[in-house]
Structures are given as structure tokens and as C-alpha cells.
């Protein structure tokens, strides 16, 4: 186990990158603490798999360093980094039994059979696959195959980090939930550093203590699930996390924020003097329909079970509000929107620019 | 409500007709010949299973069958590992992929009798490039028209040259279908190159290899044109494989009855071995 440090990491798949856009990963400085459960969240193509492959050693970065406990491993191949990785599609060795599959990484490293058996039995018990150990791995269902892949990742006691690259993609929805909680439980038991790559916010938020959100090859925010929800550092995070995502409404700023001339109270002071594109960000959960506030027209009402999502046209901008209980408005109703002040934030060129009072 | 009618049979009819004309009817003619004796003029005498018995007891048939099995065994034992080895060393992506594929496919595009003629000329001791080189430059006494060993070496080499590509292309198709994640996982698991081959590449190639071996078995077991053009079955009878012997009996001696019986036995052996091989290879997949 180790602390993993990424220092000034950049990567381009082109041999001769020129501009910033040639880089799949723009400069990244990041620390992964020993024993943490991390999620790497971002849309497809944001560079999260590239980052993962760089940590595992399948890819050598164009620039920068990777340190495991301060030791430079940038040029080391995967088998010398002592890491484990679980892939999107279950990788199992068809011709071997489940037992031999789990034993494979240990036997390749020359562990004696007694150790192998002890570890395989322990992991099999954790994953609840003990009764399958004698079976040929080829005949298993996809979720069991993926469990075996995970098992191969966890079977070595001393791995520095276990990485999961969208491991639940091919799993049936009703089993996803089971495997997800299994993973969480495993993390608590084995206490290895785990990095979980996904584009699914539910998976990221349930698994991780710390979520790293990426966009276009850049880390936009690192934080706990609560932090990401409450104080998105970037409008992208606000939009990407939450369902529906944060309302981002263009506004003007001249000492106070105004949407189409109507003043809106912000959570607190604005850092510096904003230059560039200014927007107000507020989560639908903190918008309420009231008698005073910004005038709006209801354009769509969707009942999503526990609450109702009301879509409004507010001074020409689309604004969502989440109504917990009580009378839902009708489509076409005229109303007013009130923003909870301590949740109303100002973004300048996409980045958060207000501090709480 | 489920409607039932017999219309579907019309869709099967063309295939049935095709199979009848290209397989069943010719085959039944052979069966017909195999149990009768004829002296021409469409006069036939019933012989029962006499021809079968005669063929199965004849030393000549045993010898030809032995040579046939030896030939097939030798080319399989060379072509399959060689084909896999070449496929493994071919690039998986980039500019050289199409180049390699076309180069590999070239020998298979050449008509069989041309291959025979090419190798015949190529190995002639006086004027053939290889034959002259071996005899006059290296001083090795090599003449496939005189020496059975030389004749065997030549037909085996020719078949390897002509057909290893088939194994290569099929194995290659199997190899490129393996997702990268398998190799990456193997790297992380610390697998050696041999383990990667043994536990990833070979299992993933199994299906295509089964087909490759089956095709090579059937083709080599029924081979006729190339050895016929190259050696004509000689020197002596040393390269008289089953099909060459069969043609000698049928067209050379005009013994239609024994030739027909021999064809059927020949066919039965090919079918039996292919079936056995296929069944054994696919046994694991069924349970």
C-alpha cells in the first residue's frame, strides 16, 4: 500500500503535441492517500481511462511523474508496480477453473501453494464464490466473471492500489447494486487504496470518499460527494452531478448580480472583480415557487416519484425547481421563483467565484 | 392463433435440388458402380460387397493409405505450429498489416496445377533454381525424380508453402479478436509470454484453429493435383497418395467397380476422422 502522487502529469497520444487541445490529459497534480476510496468521474472521453492506464503503467505519460510513496515509478511496467486493475469487460482465463484464475497472479509471482490457498480461500469467501471454485471459469454468468476479475485484483495482499475501470458496465441493473455494495464492503475489509473510474454519478457517489471530477482532460474538482453536490467548483460539476443538474443562468454583475435586470441575492462576497462570462448557479432543490421573486411560467411538470420536477421559463431562461410535497402547479401557470440565498452562487467563466458569508 | 402450413418447404426446395444434383446423384452413381462389375456397353453384373473386400484386403490400398496418413500427418505437424508462429509475429495494426495479409494470401491464389508445375521446374536438378543450387552449388545429391526421400521433401515443402497461409490467416483472425484488456490484465497479473500464449491466445484461437486443422486435414487427405503434376506419384509408387492411386485404378486400369468401392471407403475415412476430430475439439464447449 502506498500514497500515490501525480506530479505535473501530461499526456498526449500524438507524438508531437503542439497546442493544449492535443493533450488528452492536461497538467494534473494529484495525491491519492493510502487506503482511500476514490472515484474518477467524468463523461466519456474526458481522459479518465488515460489517467488510470498511466497509474497502472499500461501507458507512459508524455510528461510528468508518478510517485508511489515518493518513489518514481513513471517508467516501470505494470507487473513491477504491484497494482491491480479490473476492466470494463470481465477478463477471465477461460480454460482455468475459478480457483486457478484467482491463484494466477500469486503463482506468477512464485508464492508457495499454502499462501496461494489461504489467499484464494479468503478472497473467495469475501466475494461469495467459494462454491464455484472448482468450476471452469468460462461457464460463469457475467456478474460472476466480473467478481472473479475483481478477485484477481484483490488476491495479492500487498497491492499498492486496485483500480476499477467502469467495472459494472456489462452487469445487469439488479446485480449492479449488489456488486456496488460488495465493493464498498471489500474496501472496508481490505483497506487498499481503490480508484473507481466511472461516468455514472450514482456509482461514484456511493463508492467513494473522495470524488475526482474530470472534464476535457482536466481535473475540475476533488471533494466528498456532499461537497460536490453543495459547492460545485465549476458549472460542469454542477451540471454533471445531480438529477436534474444545477441551474446555470446567465447574469450581469456590477456589484450585485442581476438576471435580465432583476436583482438576485448571492450567498456571500464575490472574489475579486469578475471579468468574463458571469452566471448564477443554483440547485433545483433550492428553488421554490412562491408569491414573490423572479416571475416565471411553468412549462413542464414531471412527477419522478418522491418529488416533482417543475421546469419553468424564467425571464427567457430555463430553470428547474424540485418540489418535495404539496400541490404541484399546472403547466402554463404563472408563478414566482425564490432562490435560497445561501445556495445561490456566482460563477465566472465557469468557475465558482463566491464564498459563503 | 397459430397458422400451420407447409409453405416453408418451398424455401428448402432449391437447396434440396442443388444438393441432389451436386452430391446425392453423383454419389449414388458411385454406390451403384461399387456393387457391380461392368465390361462396358452398360452391361452390369451384381458383385455385392466383393469390391470392398478386395480393396480392404489389398496391400496396394494399405500402402497408399499409409502414405496418405503420413503425408497428412507431416503437413499438419509442420503447418499448424508454423502458421500459429507466423500469425503471432505479424503486426496487429499499422501500415504493415495489409502488406502482410496480401503476401500471406498470395500462395493460396495460385491454381493448384500451377503450383505443381512451379515446384516441378523450381526443383529440376539441371535448370531449376533450387535444384541447380542444391546439386551444383551445395553439392547435395537432390533429384526428386530418382530419390523417394527427395520427392517427399519436395511435396511436403510445396504443401507447406501453398497452405500454411490458411492457418496463418485463420489464426491471425482469432488473435486480432482478443480485446486489449486481456493482454493488459495478463501484464498486471504478471503473466509470462508463455502464459499469455497458453491461457489467452491459444484458448481464443481454439475455434478458428479447429476449423483450420479440419480444412487442412480434408484438403491434404484428398490432395491430388499438386503431387500429380509434381511427381506423378513417383518415383515408383513412393508418392502415390490415395487419390492418385484411385485415379490410376479408375481411369488407368478402368476398373470402375473397385475404384468406386475405394472412393466410398476413402470418403468414409475422411468423414470419420473429421467427425472424430470435430467432436473431440468441441466437446468442452457443450457442457
Image: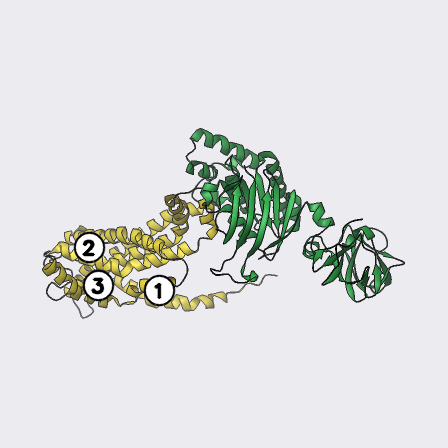
Chain colours: A green, B yellow
Q: Which residue is painted at 85% across and 52% down in the image?
A: A326
Determine which quarter of the picture holds residue A106: top left
User: Which of marks 1 and 3 precedes in the sequence?
Assistant: 1
Which numbered mark, 3 or 1, is in the foreground of this view? 1
Q: CA distance from mark 2 to mark 3?
A: 32 Å
Q: Which residue is mark 2?
A: B50
Count residues near mark 2 (Cα–Cα under 10 Å), then give few for <14, some for 14-19, many for 20+: some
Q: Quadrant of the N terminus of chain A?
A: top right
* Callout 2: chain: B
The reply to whether discs 2 and 3 touch (Cβ–Cβ < 8 Å) is no
Q: Position of residue B222 (x, y in %)?
A: 25, 59
Q: Is residue A227 above or below residue A129?
A: below
Q: Nearer the viewer, residue A354 or A60?
A: A354
Q: Residue furthest top?
A: A114
Categorize mark 1 by other alpha carbons within 10 Å: few (<14), some (14-19), many (20+): few
How far apart are labels 2 and 1 at the CA level?
56 Å
Q: Residue, x 72% and y 63% (percent of image)?
A: A277
Label 1 sits on a secondary structure element that is helix
Say above or below: B201 vs A296: above
* Marked residue chain, label 3: B
The local secondary structure at tag 2 comes to helix
Alpha-carbon distance for marks 3 and 1? 27 Å
Residue positioned 41% across, 45% down in the render: B199
- Residue B250 in view here: no
Tell me the number on the disc at residue B226: 3
Residue B7 in the image: x percent, y percent? 50, 67
Quickly name the residue at label 1: B99
Amino acid at each position: 500500500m502506498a500514497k500515490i502522487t501525480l506530479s505535473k502529469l501530461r499526456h498526449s497520444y500524438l507524438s508531437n503535441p503542439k497546442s493544449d487541445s492535443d493533450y488528452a490529459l492536461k497538467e494534473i497534480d494529484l495525491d491519492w492517500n493510502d487506503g482511500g476510496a476514490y472515484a474518477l468521474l467524468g463523461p466519456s472521453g474526458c481522459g479518465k481511462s488515460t489517467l488510470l492506464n498511466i497509474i497502472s503503467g499500461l501507458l507512459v505519460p508524455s510528461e510528468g511523474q508518478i510517485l508511489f510513496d515518493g518513489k518514481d515509478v513513471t517508467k516501470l511496467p505494470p507487473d513491477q508496480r504491484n497494482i491491480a486493475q479490473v476492466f470494463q469487460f470481465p477478463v477471465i482465463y477461460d480454460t482455468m477453473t475459478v480457483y486457478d484464475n484467482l491463484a494466477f497472479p500469486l503463482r506468477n509471482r512464485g508464492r508457495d501453494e499454502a499462501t496461494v490457498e489461504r489467499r484464494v480461500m479468503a478472497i473467495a469467501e469475501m466475494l461469495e464464490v467459494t462454491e464455484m471454485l472448482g468450476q471452469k471459469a468460462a461457464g460463469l454468468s457475467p456478474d460472476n466473471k466480473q467478481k472473479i476479475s475483481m478477485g484477481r485484483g484483490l488476491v495479492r495482499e500487498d497491492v499498492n492500489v486496485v483500480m476499477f475501470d467502469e467495472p459494472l458496465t456489462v452487469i445487469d441493473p439488479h446485480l449492479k447494486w449488489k456488486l456496488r455494495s460488495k465493493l464498498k464492503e471489500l474496501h472496508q475489509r481490505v483497506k487498499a487504496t481503490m480508484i473507481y473510474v466511472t461516468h455514472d454519478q450514482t456509482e461514484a457517489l456511493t463508492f467513494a470518499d473522495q470524488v475526482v471530477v474530470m472534464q476535457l482532460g482536466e481535473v475540475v474538482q476533488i471533494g466528498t460527494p456532499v461537497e460536490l453536490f453543495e459547492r460545485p467548483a465549476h458549472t460542469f460539476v454542477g451540471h454533471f452531478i445531480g438529477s436534474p443538474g444545477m441551474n446555470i443562468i446567465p447574469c450581469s454583475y456590477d456589484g450585485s448580480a442581476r438576471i435580465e435586470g432583476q436583482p438576485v441575492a448571492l450567498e456571500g462576497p464575490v472574489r475579486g472583480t469578475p471579468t468574463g462570462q458571469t452566471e448564477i448557479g443554483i440547485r433545483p432543490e433550492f428553488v421554490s415557487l412562491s408569491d414573490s421573486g423572479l416571475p416565471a411560467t411553468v412549462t413542464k411538470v414531471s412527477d419522478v416519484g418522491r418529488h416533482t420536477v417543475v421546469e419553468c421559463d424564467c425571464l427567457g431562461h430555463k430553470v428547474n425547481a424540485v418540489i418535495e410535497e404539496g400541490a404541484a402547479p399546472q403547466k402554463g401557470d404563472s408563478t414566482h421563483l425564490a432562490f435560497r440565498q445561501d445556495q445561490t452562487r456566482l460563477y465566472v467563466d465557469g468557475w465558482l467565484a463566491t464564498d459563503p458569508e | 392463433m397459430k397458422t400451420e402450413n407447409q409453405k416453408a418447404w418451398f424455401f428448402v426446395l432449391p437447396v434440396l435440388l442443388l444438393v441432389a444434383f451436386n452430391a446425392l446423384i453423383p454419389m449414388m452413381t458411385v454406390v451403384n458402380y461399387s456393387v457391380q462389375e461392368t465390361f462396358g456397353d452398360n452391361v452390369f453384373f451384381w458383385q455385392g460387397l466383393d469390391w470392398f473386400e478386395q480393396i480392404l484386403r489389398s496391400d496396394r490400398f494399405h500402402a497408399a493409405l499409409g502414405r496418405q496418413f503420413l503425408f497428412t500427418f507431416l503437413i499438419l505437424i509442420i503447418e499448424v505450429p508454423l502458421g500459429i508462429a507466423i500469425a503471432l509475429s505479424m503486426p496487429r495494426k499499422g501500415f504493415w498489416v495489409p502488406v502482410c495479409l496480401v503476401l500471406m494470401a498470395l500462395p493460396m491464389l495460385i491454381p493448384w496445377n500451377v503450383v505443381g508445375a512451379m515446384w516441378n521446374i523450381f526443383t529440376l536438378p539441371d535448370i531449376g533454381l533450387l535444384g541447380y543450387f542444391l546439386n551444383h552449388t551445395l553439392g547435395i545429391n537432390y533429384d526428386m525424380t530418382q530419390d523417394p526421400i527427395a520427392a517427399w521433401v519436395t511435396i511436403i515443402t510445396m504443401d507447406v508453402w501453398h497452405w500454411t497461409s490458411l492457418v496463418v490467416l485463420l489464426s491471425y483472425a482469432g488473435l486480432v479478436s482478443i480485446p486489449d484488456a486481456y493482454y493488459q490484465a495478463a501484464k498486471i497479473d504478471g503473466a509470462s509470454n508463455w502464459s499469455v500464449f497458453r491461457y489467452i491466445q491459444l484458448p481464443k484461437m481454439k475455434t478458428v484453429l479447429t476449423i483450420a486443422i479440419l480444412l487442412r486435414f480434408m484438403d491434404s487427405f484428398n490432395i491430388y493435383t499438386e503431387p500429380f503434376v509434381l511427381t506423378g506419384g513417383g518415383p515408383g509408387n513412393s508418392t502415390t497418395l490415395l487419390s492418385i492411386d484411385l485415379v490410376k485404378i479408375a481411369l488407368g486400369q478402368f476398373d470402375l467397380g473397385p475404384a468406386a468401392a475405394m472412393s466410398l471407403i476413402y470418403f468414409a475415412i475422411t468423414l470419420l476422422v473429421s467427425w472424430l476430430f470435430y467432436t473431440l475439439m468441441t466437446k468442452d464447449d457443450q457442457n
